[in-house]
Amino acid sequence: MNQRNSFGAEATLAVGGEEFTIYRLDALEGLRAQITRLPYAMKILLENLLRHEDGVSVTAADVQAVACWDAASTANGEIAFTPGRVIHQDFTGVPSVVDLAAMRDAMKRLGGDPRRIDPLQPVELVIDHSIQVDAHGTSEAFGRNGEIEFERNRERYRFLRWGQGAFGNFEVVPPQTGIVHQVNLEHLARVVLTDERGGRRRAYPDTLVGTDSHTTMVNGLGVLGWGCGGIEAEAVMLGQPVSMLVPQVVGFELKGSLPEGATATDLVLTVTQALRERGVVGKFVEFFGDGLCSLSLADRATIANMAPEYGATCGIFPIDDETIRYLRLSSRSPQRVALVEAYAKEQGLFHTSTSPVAHYSEAVTLELGTVEASVAGPRRPQDRISLAGVSRSFRQTLAELRLGAETPVKPRATTVTLGEQSHEIGDGSVVIAAITSCTNTSNPALLFAAGLLARKAVERGLKTKPWVKTSFAPGSRVATQYLAKAGLMPALEALRFHLVGYGCTTCVGNSGPLPRPVSEAVDEAELVVAAVLSGNRNFEGRVHPRVRANYLASPPLVVAYALAGRVDLDLRRAPLGHDADGEPVFLRDIWPSREEIAHAIDGTLDSAMFDMVYRDVFEGDDRWRALDVSDDDLYRWREDSTYVKNPPYFDDMTRELPELVPIRGARVLAWLGDSITTDHISPAGNIPADSPAGRYLVAQGIAPESFNAYGARRGNHEVMMRGTFANVRLRNRMAPGTEGGLTRHLPSGKVMSIFDASVLYRAEEVPLLVLAGKEYGTGSSRDWAAKGPSLIGVRAVLAESFERIHRSNLIGMGIVPLEFMAGDGAGSLGLTGEEVYEIVGLERLLEEGLDGNRWVTVRATDAAGRVLEFRATVRIDTPRELLYYRHGGILQYVLRVLLEEGESR
């Protein structure tokens, strides 16, 4: 990079006997800028531009535009943001490493040096999504699940070990360490990064992108970062900046403190509901106000974690005294802590009670004292319900949850035999109660609350209902250390909340099988049963294929619902059970006070626990170290592999820019509704034996019990193509009255799987479209939700609105996102989905660039020859996104750039 210093911002900062080059923000005060009143996040972006000013990707005008940011403006220019590092989890990280390995092969085939495909930025991958809850409710569960995990995933892990050796700047955190976001929060995040450039040691804010949408959890530590698709992360790894519009920043003022009985989970569900209603997709959210001082770092991380659920790019908190306290608690080095504090204060990034309030695009205020005990569900994280209203809400949604039922419906029940006893279960029975996921298991106060509640329940003689599958999967080994030291693990285990593993389990669909009698009873009686989990995702078909009602709740409420065994009762008024004397025991009787929780934390949690857990975090256990891997620069693909295959993205690629191929004669593969998630498009959970992916695996000699999950098979494009739109809860209007990955092939009208239809359309050389409603692509930053549609022939998605990450992923895979004009939709325009479509004017618009109107004409012709024309906006928002699309995808663009750079050397 040709570093420029147009504003004289280079300076020196001395800390602890070391000198660091920094880029001073106050050097820009003379530009009519009010740097002190910029939002914290905008200051981070501004420093990033200052440090990367080269006159090409970042110009002096770019720096000045951000320095003079107008909070009231909605006309946002494009900037090139260069994250300081990249983080992966293994479900999203394995396909990224597969892509890099395939790019090396393509580079060699095209005459370049394969070793040029190598990360230029630090990259860390945490293996955390492969653990499943196969065993539960016993002291052997943790060991057994670990054994099964390694048996299932040995080939994937061997591949990652190869990547760790083959690529520079690439570290892997082995299995059973913790959830990626908590490991990031507790250890990997630096808050202030350092490096060596030109013989000088530089210091600058820690920034990152991650291939998990909940990368935002580290925003609670004052680190700016967010989730992105794997393909975009790969480009960043290879030196490409993130092309983005200068964001609007929504200020979220927190006032006062939480009332007794309310938790950080209740708070984040309240925040999520409020911001979803406000509409913050594509915006930054920044928290401020006197309420900050009442929130622990873990509380802040809980709120930041769910930024994708409230739709924001990030949900950031500033650096302050609480940040410094947490860095010391989590055993960061004294040198690092001193640097963070000195740098933040020098740059005006350190928040105190006297810090001026920033100018925000808009502001929201929440009185923390109004937060009440809540859950969210039964299908979306933004659908908050007060605890008192859960029973009523479930009854009101029962007909909708029971597909095809008429309102009102009569609740169903049946008998299930477990061991030697029979029990009645029915609609509303809780069959899964899981303390899981990064949202809450990063928060000691929430885990101590669960442990203290469990202890009181055991003392009163309560037991969890036998039909409830219980599990405890904390995000870090530190959690079990402090719970054991506090003497709370025995109580949790007495209620069958045994440790099942360290990682993302139930929330991502790794909930494992239900006990067979329960599973059979649910199927035979067609029950609408429930899961209660302390996670952040409860989308349809995600948690478990047999569970239609899924509720997000705090860890203590997860325990309470396991005791009650049902969601269709009011925990405020109905007893959880009865003690040995026959007296009712209510939730209020065993709910721990804030004072009890604080006392438990103060007497237990210390920095030595973090030091012990993270001292050798990259080493792994004997199984990990014993993996046999080659040291070749190119990966040795195995033809018989069902986990890792060479993808076809570069098969026909040439050095030259391809011509634009018109979209005409297209058919609708799927017509979908609102809030279609990336789980609907590319599920992460179990693979049904009777699905196209299941049949493929059986044909490869894989028994159904060894299928593993879709997420674990993301290194195999053959599985993932067949799993595209295969969610068991997907409802496609092209095949009305059905549920699952079905469509009608046109013009034959035959109902078949979406994958099988795509094969027929490909043979007929028919391009494909997807029609959708609002918030298309919400949820996880799942690049396979774009890769899969691309590989089965989808050329465009026409939706009423898109979620940020998924829109970017579509472009990165060569799919054009088209947005109906305001007020329009497939239904209101009178479309049936049976028309033949042409996108008129797309090639001209893309050839001329993005200046002026960005709309095209969509021409839909029905079987009788009648033509309907309407306009749609092309949601390729920046010139760099246009480059990616013109090259056929982001990876093809990067590969051609590297080839050209190699020739010029």
Image (tube, rainbow, N blue to C red):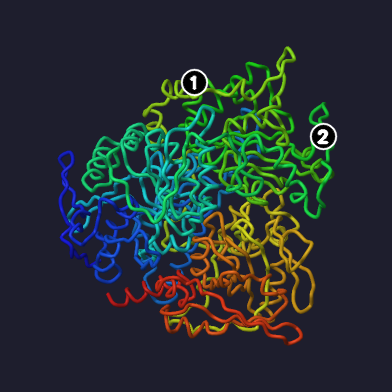
**SS of the residue under disc 2:** strand
Q: Residue at horizontal 72%, vertical 33%? A: 569
Which amino acid does the dot numbered 1 rest on? Glu
Percent position of residue 677, x then y: 60, 57
Q: Is residue 618 visible?
A: no
Q: Which residue is mark 1?
A: 596
- Residue 43 image position (x, y, % from top left): 30, 53
In this view, the residue in front, 875 or 885, is: 875
Looking at the image, do the residues carrying marks 2 and 1 touch, with CB atoms under 8 Å apart?
A: no
Q: Position of residue 889 (x, y in %)?
A: 48, 72
Foreground disc of the pair 2, 1: 1
Where 468 falls versus 404 (above or below)?
above
Compared to 312, does 601 lie above or below? Answer: above
Q: How many marks?
A: 2
Q: Quadrant of the C terminus?
A: bottom left
Q: Which mark is residue 301?
A: none
Q: Position of residue 710 (x, y in %)?
A: 62, 55
In the image, is 321 to the left or to the right of 538?
Answer: left
Q: On the rendered structure, is 143 left or right of 696?
A: left
Location of the N terminus by quadrant is bottom left
Residue linked to disc 2: 416
- Sequence-wise, which precedes: disc 2 or disc 1? 2
Other-residue count near label 1 (Cα within 10 Å), few / some / many at <14 / 14–19 / ≥20? few
Question: Is the residue 397 above or below the residue 451 in the image?
Answer: below
Label 2, residues with CA under 10 Å away: few <14, some 14-19, many ≥20: some
Q: Amino acid at mark 2?
A: Val
User: Could you give the CA–CA distance between mark 2 and mark 1, rounded to whole angstroms?
Assistant: 39 Å
Secondary-structure class at tag 1: helix
